[in-house]
Structure formats: structure tokens, C-alpha cells
């Protein structure tokens, strides 16, 4: 328990954990095995009010960003595919909150109720980290924008009701919002090694007509929209990674105390203890990084570097500890569909989403240069 987290938040965590254990946990392996969108579980978290977290009261939500992170953490502990929906929701809600007009923000009430399935269409076949390499175009014709282009690796593309789309307007990039229609066509399902319950595909945008009201923020301001949204959403992704790490820790302790070798539990062997101690420390450090950044955000202070640090450390720790948990469990860690197997497969995606680990290091170093004022080359 973190010393700066108050008792109300801890009681909230207990309530969400009880809900997740009772209503979500048993379905996670089904969605993974059959590669299904977790529709019923998504409805349940909407009914529980979890999708309203992070959305201000004025727009039909319940506000608290800290609780949004705690809920994401607890959801990821039992169902990694469902926690991805919290990440996509965060991207969508923060885009509208930070840069949307009143009409855009009116959509947040339906998002909080689970009536909107969002998608965030930024990445293209040529790459994701190269934010200046967007080729999708939005040409101005007869007072409207006409969008054409292709997006790649878009979560929820086959089922999204609303999409945020980034496109080039002349020399600069702009952000738009659109309801799903016949001019937005998802490609074949992309089957991934992990996160198998997340429906991912390309999107082909052909002659999509949008009016001025579909523009988010100002024309040419798309990169500012993108980077403003990343800071909070990276913390949501990090909270999901932390929740998965907690599950690995629990599974590793349980197995190592029950499994015997040489007539004693394998937990008595030092190399097993090393793995478990490393997990415990990574969980504690990740918690401090995530919630310190979250409190900075809550108090309207700069937290971009702290968010990138949290994302880098937590996701890389998850990937490392997923390997360690599988090694602790031996052959049992290699059985398809177990919690450790699912997290092992899912862990790599966390280091890629919302900026790769390499991109996070560049971001962090750029802030170090800025803070130091030394102009390091």
C-alpha cells in the first residue's frame, strides 16, 4: 500500500477486486481461447460505473483519474483483454476532453455507459512511432474535408462505433472524429500472439466526407492533440501492466509454495526467491512511478517525463517477470490458456503500445536535456 494513497481509494480497490473476481475472472480464458471481444464483460464494467471513471461529472462521468488507474489495474489482473479497452477509452475520452468542442464532449456520456465502442486511428502501414510520417490525407473540397488513406493495427477497428482519425491537412496533421459508416472499411482481422480478445485490423478510408464540426481542435493541430493525450493514456496502459504483474506475483508465490522438489517447496530455493523478490520490488517501484505521475496530473502539474518513465519501467518489468513466472512454473508455465501463459503472450504488446520502449527513452532523455539546461548533444 502506497503511503500517499488514502483509505477511500484502498476501499475502492477492494470493491473493484471483489467485482473482478466474481464477475470477470472466469471469462478471461474464454475470450483469449476463442479470440472474442469481451462483450459481456464490457457491459458489466459499464454497469459497475468503471467506464465513467476519468470522465468529469459534468459530462456524465464520475471524474476520478486515480480511481480509473486503480480499476484498470484490478481489471488487468484478471482479464488483460478487457484492460486494453480501458486504454482505448482513455485515448478517446482525453482527446475529447482536452481538445473537443461541446458537441464532441456530449459523446462522453454514452462512452461512460458503454454505448460507444471507440477506436483511435493513428498508426499507418509505414509505422507508428514516426508521427510525422502520416500519409492519410484530408483535402478541403466545397467546404468539407474528404479523407483518404489506410490505418494499421487499429484496436476495435472491426467493431468501433466512433473513431478518432488523424490525417494530413496540407503540410500539417489534424485530428477528426467520425461515426462508423460505409466509407470506413476494416480489413481482415490481424491475429496476434497475445491480446487475442482485442479485435485488431487495418482500416481503409475512402472518400470519407466530414464537416468542420468533425475537426478536433484547430486544423493543423493534430500533433498537439496526439501528444497531449499520450501522457494520461500511458499511465492507464502502465496500470494495466502493473495489474498483470501482480497476477504473476500471486501465481508464482502460490505455485512455488505448493510445488516440491527434493521433499521441500521450491520456494526454499534461492533462485526462486530471487525471482519473487525481483517481482515484489518491480511492483512497488512501478506503483510509485505510476501514482506519483497520476498525482502530478491530478494537481495540474507537468508529468510527461514521469508518465514516460512509468510506461517504460512497468512494461519492461512485466515482460521480464512474465518470463520469470513461466520459469518458476516449468512445464506448467507452458500450458496454453493458463494465467501465466496469457500474460506471457500479452506482455510484449504493452512495450509497443502508445510508444515503444525505445521511443520512451528518447522522450525521457529529451526532458532530461530540457531540465538540465546543458544542451547535451
Image: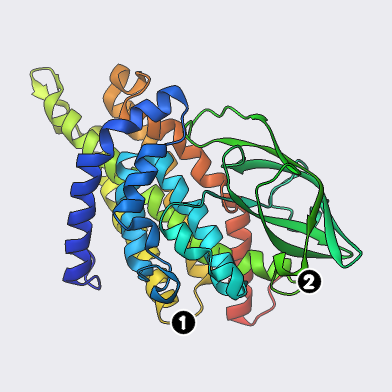
Which residue is drawn at the image coordinates 52% and 48% (left, top)? 117
Q: Is residue 248 left or right of residue 183?
A: left
Say if 149 sits above or below 227 in the image: above
Is residue 308 visible in the rendered image? The answer is no
Q: Quadrant of the C terminus?
A: bottom right
Judging by the rendered image, the residue that carries numbered circle 1 is 300
The residue lying at 52 percent from left, 40 percent from top is 349
Q: Position of residue 213 (x, y in %)?
A: 71, 69
Task: Pinpoint residue 56: horizontal percent, then vertical percent.
Answer: 42, 73
N-terminal of the pair, mark 1 or mark 2, is 2
Residue at the (26%, 49%) spot, across then down = 280
**Do the CB atoms of the residues marked 1 and 2 lie less than 8 Å apart?**
no
Mark 1 or 2: in front is 2
**Neighbour class for label 2 at 10 Å: few (<14), some, many (≥20)?**
some
- The quarter of the picture where residue 290 lies is bottom left
- State the residue in front, 300 or 273: 300
Query: In the rendered view, does 367 fall on the left or right side of 261?
Result: right
Q: Is residue 264 above or below residue 13?
A: above
What x and y, as percent, mark residue 308?
52, 62
Q: Element at badge 2?
A: loop
Q: Is mark 1 on a helix, strand or loop?
A: loop
User: Foreground: 67 or 346?
Assistant: 67
Cα separation between marks 1 and 2: 26 Å
- Asked where in the image residue 165 lies, by quadrant, the reply is bottom right
Give the quarter of the figure containing the N terminus. bottom left
Q: Residue 375 shows which numbered tag?
A: none
- Tell me if residue 154 comes above or below residue 65 in the rendering: above
* Residue pointed to by mark 2: 219
List x then y, in percent, for residue 204. Answer: 76, 40
Q: In this view, does 239 lie to the left or right of 181?
A: left
Amino acid at each position: 500500500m502506497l503511503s500517499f494513497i488514502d483509505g477511500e481509494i484502498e476501499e475502492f480497490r477492494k470493491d473493484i477486486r471483489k467485482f473482478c473476481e466474481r464477475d470477470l475472472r472466469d471469462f478471461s480464458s474464454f475470450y483469449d481461447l476463442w479470440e472474442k471481444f469481451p462483450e459481456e464483460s464490457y457491459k458489466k464494467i459499464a454497469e459497475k460505473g468503471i467506464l465513467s471513471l476519468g470522465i468529469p461529472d459534468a459530462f456524465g462521468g464520475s471524474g476520478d483519474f486515480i480511481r480509473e488507474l486503480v480499476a484498470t489495474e484490478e481489471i488487468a489482473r484478471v482479464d488483460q483483454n478487457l484492460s486494453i479497452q480501458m486504454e482505448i477509452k482513455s485515448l478517446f475520452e482525453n482527446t475529447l476532453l482536452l481538445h473537443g468542442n461541446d458537441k464532441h464532449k456530449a459523446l462522453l456520456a454514452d462512452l461512460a455507459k458503454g454505448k460507444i465502442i471507440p477506436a483511435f486511428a493513428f498508426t499507418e502501414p509505414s509505422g507508428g512511432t514516426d508521427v510525422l510520417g502520416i500519409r492519410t490525407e484530408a483535402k478541403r473540397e466545397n467546404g468539407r474535408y474528404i479523407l483518404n488513406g489506410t490505418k494499421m493495427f487499429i484496436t476495435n477497428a472491426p467493431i468501433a462505433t466512433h473513431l478518432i482519425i488523424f490525417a494530413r491537412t496540407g503540410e500539417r496533421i489534424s485530428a477528426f472524429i467520425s461515426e462508423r459508416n460505409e466509407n470506413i472499411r476494416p480489413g481482415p482481422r490481424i491475429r496476434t500472439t497475445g491480446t487475442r480478445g482485442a479485435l485488431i485490423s487495418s482500416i481503409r478510408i475512402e472518400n470519407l466526407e466530414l464537416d468542420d464540426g468533425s475537426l478536433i481542435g484547430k486544423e493543423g493541430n493534430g500533433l498537439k492533440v496526439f501528444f497531449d493525450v499520450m501522457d494520461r493514456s500511458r499511465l492507464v496502459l502502465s496500470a494495466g501492466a502493473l495489474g498483470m504483474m501482480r497476477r504473476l506475483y500471486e501465481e508464482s508465490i502460490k505455485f512455488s509454495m505448493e510445488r516440491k522438489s527434493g521433499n521441500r517447496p521450491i520456494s526454499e530455493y534461492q533462485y526462486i526467491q530471487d525471482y519473487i523478490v525481483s517481482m515484489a520490488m518491480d511492483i512497488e517501484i512501478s506503483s510509485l512511478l505510476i501514482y506519483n505521475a497520476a498525482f502530478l496530473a491530478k494537481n495540474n502539474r507537468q508529468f510527461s517525463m514521469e508518465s514516460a518513465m512509468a510506461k517504460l519501467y512497468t512494461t519492461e518489468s512485466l515482460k521480464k517477470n512474465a518470463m520469470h513466472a513461466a520459469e518458476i512454473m516449468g512445464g506448467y508455465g507452458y500450458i496454453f490458456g493458463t494465467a501465466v501463459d496469457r500474460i506471457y503472450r500479452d506482455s510484449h504488446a504493452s512495450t509497443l503500445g502508445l510508444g515503444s520502449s525505445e521511443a520512451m527513452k528518447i522522450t525521457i532523455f529529451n526532458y532530461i536535456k530540457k531540465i538540465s539546461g546543458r544542451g547535451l548533444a
